Amino acid sequence: MSETPLPQPLLDDDALDYLDDFFDSERVGPDALDLIGTHGYLVALAVAPREVPAATWVAELFQGEPDFADDAERERVLALLEQLRHNAIEALEQGLLPELLFELTLDGIAPEETPIGDWCAGFMEAVFLDEAAWFEGDEESAAALLLPFMALSGLFDDEPDMAELAGSPSQLEELVAQLPELVLDLYLLYRVPPEKPKPSPQRKRPAGAKGGKGGKGGKGQGSRKR
């Protein structure tokens, strides 16, 4: 029985510290996401069913252009953001789970008051960039897999469907524990194409059989998997 692989860091500690300092600086506007929200945002972009142009997601992330100190800082920040997104894709492509930047427990605190809520809110902000694409295929599966992110983000607390979840700390804890696996499940739903049906071999005619209508080849149905 194989062991569950350890979650994969998407950036090293030095890179995360650098981004944390940048997002916490006055060069970034008050409406921009923080590092935790940005991590969720970029992981969602790695999962997304369609590519979002970099200019679009960068502008939405920062809610405008940050006051970069110089071109070198701008290039480094944007390169690290793209590297995080790319590393998330690489990890998920290998069936690995992304390492999140917080402990997977609420400890009785409301999700929106924790980094978990910030991360899920960032994730949902990326979904909003191209919401139709997330639901246009298998809408039922997409809705079920996105529900935990929605419930934990605090962005949907006014919706009746969320009231039951919000009022159940035990259910919320279960959702938090599942977040890394849910990210992988979403990636598989959107990014891994179903197998093409394999053609069945044609039946051989018995020796001496004449051509024409005899010996039809049967067509088998291939399987589909996510």
Image: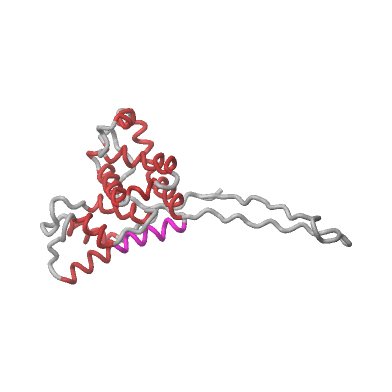
Residue in view at x 13 percent, y 54 percent: 29
Q: How is the image coloured?
A: secondary structure
Taking the view exactly as shown, the residue that stands out farthest to the front is: 212
Tally of numbered discs: 0
Measured as percent of width and height from the top left, residue 89 is found at 39, 59
Which range is magenta? Answer: 82-94
Q: Residue 178 lies in magenta, yes or no?
A: no
**Image spot of residue 14 (x, y percent):** 26, 62
Q: Is residue 86 magenta?
A: yes
Magenta region's main secondary structure?
A: helix
Image quadrant in which you'd find residue 86: bottom left
| Residue 153 horizontal/vertical position (percent) | 28, 41
Give above or below for 110 relative to 87. Answer: above
| Horizontal relation, residue 128 to residue 202: left or right | left
Q: Residue furthest left?
A: 26
Dividing the picture into quarters, in which one does residue 109 lie? Answer: top left
Front residue (pair 144, 204): 204
* Residue at position x 30%, y 29% in the image: 160
Look at 32% across and 49% down and name the residue there.
127
The answer to whether 136 appears left or right of 27 in the picture is right
Q: Is residue 188 left or right of residue 156?
A: right
Left or right: residue 145 versus residue 157 is: right
Q: How far from the left and from the top, in percent, is residue 43?
A: 34, 53
